[in-house]
Image: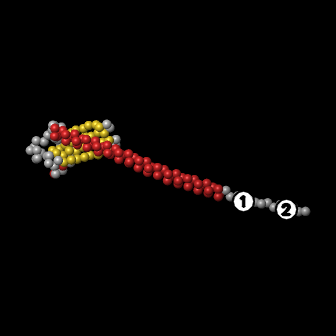
Amino acid sequence: MCHTKIYNLQLTTHSSEGISLLFIVLITSLILSVGLGLTALLIQGMRIISEIGYSVGAFYAADSGIEEALYDLYQNPSPSAEHSGNLDSAHYQTFAKCDKDTLSGSCLLGDVNIDPNCNEDTLKYCLKSLGSYQRVKRAIEIKY
C-alpha cells in the first residue's frame, strides 16, 4: 500500500499587513497635522482678538493726552511742548506745534514729533498724542 501524503503549502503574505500599518500611520499623521494647523490658526485669532481690547485702551490713553494738552493750553500755556502720563498700565505722550504766523511769532510750544505739513490747515495748534497699552500703540492728531 502506498500512502501518499498531501501537503498543503499555504503561502502567507505579510506584505498586506505591512501596507495596512503604513496607511494607518500616514492617515494618523495627516489628521494630526490638520489638527495642529487649525490649532495654530485659532491661537493666532485669539491673540488678535485680545489685542483689539488693548487697542481700545491705547486709543483712550492717547485721547487722555489730547484732553490734558488742550486743558493746559486753555488754562496756562507753558513753554513745555511735551506732556506724558500714566493711566493704570496705559501710557500717553503728547506733543504740540503752533502756527507762528497766526500767533504773531510768539509760539510757546516747540516743534517736536509733529508732521511738518501740520500747519497747512491749522488755525493755531497741532497736537499729537501717542497712547500705548500692553504691546499696542495708537496715535491721535488734531488741528485747531
Is residue 65 visible in this depiction of the protein? yes
The N terminus: image quadrant = bottom right
Tell me what residue is drawn at x 28 percent, y 41 percent: 61
Image color mode? secondary structure
Counting from the top left corner in percent of width and height, residue 75 is at: 16, 38
- Residue annotated with mark 2: 4
Mark 2 residue element = loop
Residue 60 vs residue 79: left or right? right
Q: Is residue 77 above or below residue 47?
A: above
- Residue annotated with mark 1: 11
Residue count near mark 2 (Cα–Cα under 10 Å), binned few <14, some 14–19, many ≥20: few
Residue count near mark 1 (Cα–Cα under 10 Å), binned few <14, some 14–19, many ≥20: few
Residue 10 vs residue 137: left or right? right
Tell me what residue is drawn at x 70 percent, y 58 percent: 12
Tell me what residue is drawn at x 44 percent, y 50 percent: 42
Mark 1 residue element = loop
Q: Amino acid at mark 1?
A: Leu
Tell me what residue is drawn at x 85 percent, y 62 percent: 4
Image quadrant of residue 67? top left
Is residue 94 visible in this depiction of the protein? no
Counting from the top left corner in percent of width and height, residue 25 is at: 57, 53
Label 2 to label 1: alpha-carbon separation: 21 Å
